[in-house]
Image (spheres, rainbow, N blue to C red):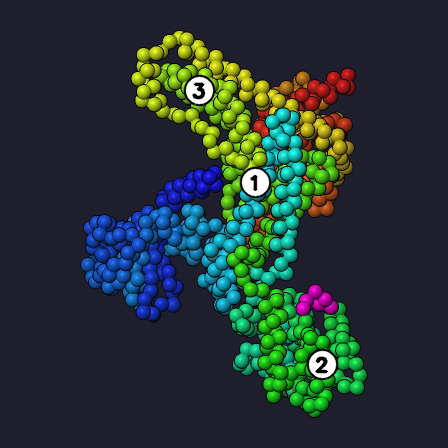
């Protein structure tokens, strides 16, 4: 229900957003036209204009959406006939892009397309679409999630039958369903863990709710870990199974390549060392895509060019999913143990560049079997399953070789399936790995230290990583779940509506009659609603306050205004506000208690050695005698760090105002978790925008990692887009006292005022204790 609402809001938002964009057009059937039919697609809020202008119709009502009409189309200014074609339109949001879409199914000639493009370009706010822009708009308008959009692109690029199946399933939402299921499970666990933090002492919250959260997170952790142990099946199928043909010079590698590609792709000759470079070719074997590489013969050589060829062969082999090792059968002695000879041959080849390729599957081809007599051939046929004797010249056993190779590749890729889809994309792998790491941190922290608040931060990060794969905005949803789930927030909403209703005296009467009278019952109902959700039974009956007065009540209300009703209203509201205040205080107390309990067991903080933004080397000892509030972040952070640093600046401002009352000075510190990019100069410039009081710290990667380890700050570099990347990191501020001891920490959910108040309290306690 809530997801549907969110999707609706997202769609509404993006629909509004996209309606302000230009109307775009392009050839949906690609630019290699010269075909019977080509389709020009137009998408945007002004798309239907083109339908009317080009067909010279006056009313859109003449075109029913999704119906094809045979129409003559004209140049809108010169009235020249351009073509006769089929036209159709789709009304947004029920279209591919979620916007109004018009299509002209024209005759597929360059001249017709150009003439129409010329007309369309002359329309105001019309422009040619960028590559992939229709799909991008479909995603932005909530018609596709990111995995579905990627599936669509893969389907367009699919070369083989199995690739087509896999991408089609993905486009139909196979991965989305899987990842969304995990994400929603995590969002629920997160909401429940938050509830536990807030109300764990409340008699109405079940004690085993936390055990339930841990168990559920463990199940998701196991499922994602299993999904990651896929031997890259989906990716191999998507990108093609990479196979290198390796072997000594003249073994017949190029001959085998030519058989597989069914054309003379590589030069074959009796001269050893004919192939010097890597020769790549793509083929479709039994519906599976293969990227096949012929390589230079492996040998020890002093010739620098040959040596380079050998190095390239090894490099390529290292990046492959399967190796075909070709051995000239005439180099083996029939009188000695063949398996041992083959093993020695491989080991000799691989030691040329000290490689073993242990983790890569190998298929061994004993070539030139035509050179041995039939009796001896039988002996070779009885060797290991991954050894196959063939002849490239006489085609002996080639069919068997192809079947075996197909079997190996099918095992590498497996048959695509909608219900158990495989990972298809490196991007997904990166974020899933991140999710698993965060979940592991959550489970470790919660099991070893009962450090719930910090552990929950990792659960939040895990949810975010999963959401990044499908492209959903998880934070709003999480807030919404919490908002719906927990009754104190619900009552806040009631108060808000009460206050707004109080502005109208008519409504105040209604409140007195309908809301305030049954207060206790109402609160009880709300509470049942939140606990039932914790037990996974959402209370669908919980009522909302009607904003409008029923007409019968309106009539009565008109004549019943009295000071008594107004007074009751105000008193009722005041008691509710007092009740909320009480809940907030208790919640804060619970949190503090939980934090203190956790802190008692935690060993946060420790020695560090870094350099300041003005290039002075410092250690933790240099900060003794000061209160430190440390934030870990990076200067390229697009949103969270700027928000948190603004908060840090506000905290600093508040505490600096009370400087005179403080026994020890307060020092805000920013530590970069991106030492590669964050130079002292850059940090110095960056921090100036927030506060002149900040000290920025950076160092070598090891120094920063060391400090982060002591402070249990998780950080990890995300995937690179060009030179740019995001650093994922825990968002926590740490308070360190003048003795250099860790005192408290504050998550993103704390406001500047809450943090400043808490620090002030710690300062006072410290002062009292050190009198
Ligand atoms: N008798 C026989 N000769 C073969 C067979 N396969 C390849 N040859 C011959 O072996 C020689 C080398 O073949 P290539 O395919 O060029 O061998 P290669 O491994 O690519 O050699 P380099 O590129 O020099 O490393 C050629 O003369 C081929 O005709 C086979 O099955 N039987
Ligand atoms: Mg060759």
**Which residue corresponds to the image point at 59% horizontal and 76% vertical from the top-left?**
403
Which quadrant would residue 112 be assigned to in this image? bottom left
Residue 658 sits inside the magenta stretch: no
Q: At 41% across and 11% down in the image, what residue appears?
A: 565
- Tell me the element at label 3: helix
Q: Quadrant of residue 325?
A: bottom right
771 relative to 153, above or below: above
Between 506 and 319, the one lying in front of the other is 506
> Is label 3 within 8 A of ligand 2 (CB to nearest ligand atom)?
no
Please tell me in which quarter of the rendered image ligand 1 is found.
bottom right
Q: Main secondary structure of the magenta part?
A: loop
Q: Judge the density around disc 3: few (<14), some (14-19), many (≥20) Cα neighbours within 10 Å.
A: some
> Which of the two residues, 706 or 177, is positioned nearer the viewer here?
177
Q: Position of residue 491 (x, y in %)?
A: 50, 24
Does mark 2 have its CB less than 8 Å from ligand 1? Answer: no
Residue 382: assigned label: 2
N-terminal label among 1 and 2: 1
Q: Residues within 10 Å of mark 2 (few under 14, many from 20)?
A: few
Rendered view: 517 above or below 66: above
């Amino acid at each position: 229900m809530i997801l549907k609402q969110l999707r609706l809001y997202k769609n509404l938002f993006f629909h509004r957003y996209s309606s302000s964009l230009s109307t775009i057009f392009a050839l949906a059937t690609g630019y290699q036209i010269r075909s019977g039919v080509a389709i020009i697609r137009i998408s945007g809020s002004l798309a239907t204009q083109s339908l009317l202008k080009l067909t010279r119709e006056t009313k859109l009502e003449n075109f029913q959406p999704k119906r094809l009409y045979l129409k003559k189309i004209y140049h809108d200014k010169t009235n020249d006939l351009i073509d006769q074609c089929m036209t159709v339109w789709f009304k947004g949001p029920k279209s591919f892009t979620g916007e109004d879409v018009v299509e002209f199914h024209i005759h597929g000639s360059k001249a017709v397309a150009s003439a129409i493009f010329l007309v369309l370009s002359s329309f105001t706010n019309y422009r040619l679409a960028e590559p992939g822009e229709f799909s991008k708009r479909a995603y932005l308008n909530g018609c596709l999630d990111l995995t579905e959009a990627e599936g669509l692109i893969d389907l367009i690029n699919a070369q083989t039958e199995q690739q087509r199946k896999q991408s089609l399933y993905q486009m139909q939402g196979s991965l989305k369903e899987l990842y969304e299921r995990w994400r929603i499970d995590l969002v629920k666990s997160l909401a429940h863990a938050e509830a536990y933090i807030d109300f764990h002492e409340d008699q109405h919250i079940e004690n085993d709710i936390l055990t339930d959260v841990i168990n559920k997170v463990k199940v998701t952790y196991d499922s994602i870990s299993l999904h990651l142990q896929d031997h890259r099946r989906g990716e191999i199928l998507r990108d093609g199974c990479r196979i290198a043909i390796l072997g000594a010079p003249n073994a017949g590698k190029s001959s085998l390549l030519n058989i597989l590609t069914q054309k003379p792709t590589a030069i074959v000759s009796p001269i050893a060392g004919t192939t010097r470079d890597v020769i790549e070719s793509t083929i479709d074997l039994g519906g599976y895509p293969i990227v096949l590489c012929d390589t230079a013969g492996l040998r020890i050589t002093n010739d620098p060019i040959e040596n380079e060829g050998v190095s390239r062969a090894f490099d390529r082999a290292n990046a492959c999913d399967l190796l075909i090792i070709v051995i000239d059968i005439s180099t083996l002695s029939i009188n000695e143990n063949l398996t041992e000879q083959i093993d020695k041959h491989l080991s000799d080849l691989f030691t040329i560049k000290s490689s073993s390729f242990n983790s890569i599957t190998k298929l061994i081809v004993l070539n030139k079997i035509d050179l041995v007599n039939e009796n001896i051939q039988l002996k070779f046929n009885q060797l290991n399953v991954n050894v196959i004797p063939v002849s490239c010249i006489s085609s002996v056993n080639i069919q068997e070789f192809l079947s075996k190779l197909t079997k190996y590749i099918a095992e590498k890729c497996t048959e695509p399936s909608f219900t158990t889809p495989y990972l298809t994309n490196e991007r997904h792998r990166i974020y899933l790995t991140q999710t698993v790491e965060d979940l592991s941190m959550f489970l470790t922290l919660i099991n070893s230290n009962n450090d719930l608040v910090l552990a929950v931060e990792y659960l939040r990060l895990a949810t975010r990583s999963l959401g990044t794969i499908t492209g959903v905005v998880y934070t709003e949803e999480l807030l919404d779940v919490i908002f719906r789930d927990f009754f104190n927030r619900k009552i806040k909403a009631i108060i808000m509506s009460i206050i707004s209703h109080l502005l109208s005296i008519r409504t105040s009467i209604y409140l007195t009659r309908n809301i305030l009278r049954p207060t206790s019952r109402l609160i009880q109902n709300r509470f049942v609603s939140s606990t039932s959700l914790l037990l996974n039974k959402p209370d669908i009956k919980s009522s909302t306050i009607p904003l409008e007065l029923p007409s019968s009540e309106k009539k009565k209300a008109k004549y019943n205004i009295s000071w008594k009703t107004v007074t009751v209203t105000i008193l009722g509201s005041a008691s509710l506000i007092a009740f909320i205040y009480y809940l907030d205080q208790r919640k804060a107390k619970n949190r503090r208690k939980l934090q203190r309990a956790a802190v008692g067991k935690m060993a946060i903080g420790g020695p560090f050695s870094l350099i300041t933004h003005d290039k002075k080397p410092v250690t933790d000892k240099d900060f003794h005698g000061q209160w430190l509030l440390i934030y870990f972040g990076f200067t390229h952070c697009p949103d969270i760090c700027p928000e948190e640093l603004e908060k840090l600046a506000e905290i600093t401002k508040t505490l600096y105002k009370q400087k005179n009352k403080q026994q020890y000075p307060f020092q805000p510190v920013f530590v970069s978790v991106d030492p590669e990019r964050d130079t002292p100069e850059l940090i110095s410039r960056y921090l100036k925008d927030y506060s002149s009081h900040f000290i920025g710290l950076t160092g070598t990667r090891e120094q920063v990692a060391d400090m982060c380890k002591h402070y249990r700050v998780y950080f990890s570099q995300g995937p690179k887009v060009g030179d740019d990347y995001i650093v994922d990191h825990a968002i926590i501020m740490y308070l360190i006292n003048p003795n250099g001891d860790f005192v408290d920490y504050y998550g993103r959910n704390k406001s500047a005022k809450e943090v400043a108040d808490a620090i002030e309290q710690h300062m006072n306690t410290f002062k009292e204790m050190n009198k």
